[in-house]
């Protein structure tokens, strides 16, 4: 609310006339402020969506690189195991037999 203090025509400063704005002017002011706030919120939403989109693209790229590295490592390990088993077949069979026996005995005792 605004106030306008004017001195009286007789020059007396002790008497003041208070002029207030009407309700329609106040409503227009609130409507203008609400409009500005809504525009700012929409702009912030657009900025947030753009930032989230860039973050999603970055995350997708990082996860693809991690998956590729994991697959490459697994293939390399599988190749090394095949090579080791191929060069020492009887040792591999005996190790597998021993591991199977230990697992079998441990499960048998629980039952």
Image (cartoon, grey):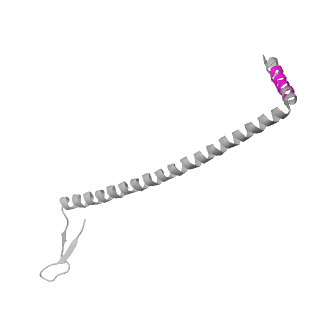
Q: Quadrant of the C terminus?
A: top right
Is 16 included in the stretch rendered in magenta? no
Name the residue rendered at 72%, 41% in the picture: 76
Q: Is residue 101 above or below residue 77?
A: above
Q: Residue 6 location, x and y as percent?
A: 18, 77
Percent x, y of residue 87? 84, 34
Residue at figure coordinates x 22%, y 58% from the top left:
27
In the depicted structure, whether residue 16 falls above or below residue 47:
below
Residue 93 image offset from top left, x and y in percent:
84, 26
As drawn, 58 above or below 19 = above
* Magenta span contains residue 103: yes
Which secondary structure dominates the residues rendered in magenta? Answer: helix
Asked whether, in this view, residue 36 is left or right of residue 65, the answer is: left
Residues shaded magenta: 94-105
In the depicted structure, whether residue 102 falls above or below residue 66: above
Q: Is residue 60 left or right of residue 69?
A: left
| Residue found farthest to the left | 9
> Which residue is at the far top?
111
């Amino acid at each position: 609310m605004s106030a306008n203090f004017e001195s009286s025509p007789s020059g007396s400063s002790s008497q003041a006339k208070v002029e207030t704005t009407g309700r329609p002017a106040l409503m227009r002011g609130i409507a203008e402020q609400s409009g500005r706030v809504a525009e700012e919120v929409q702009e912030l939403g657009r900025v947030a969506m753009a930032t989230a989109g860039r973050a999603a693209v970055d995350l997708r790229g990082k996860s693809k690189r991690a998956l590729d590295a994991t697959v490459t490592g697994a293939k390399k390990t599988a190749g090394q195991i095949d090579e080791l088993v191929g060069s020492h077949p009887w040792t591999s069979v005996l190790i597998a037999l021993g591991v199977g026996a230990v697992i079998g005995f441990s499960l048998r005792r629980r039952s």
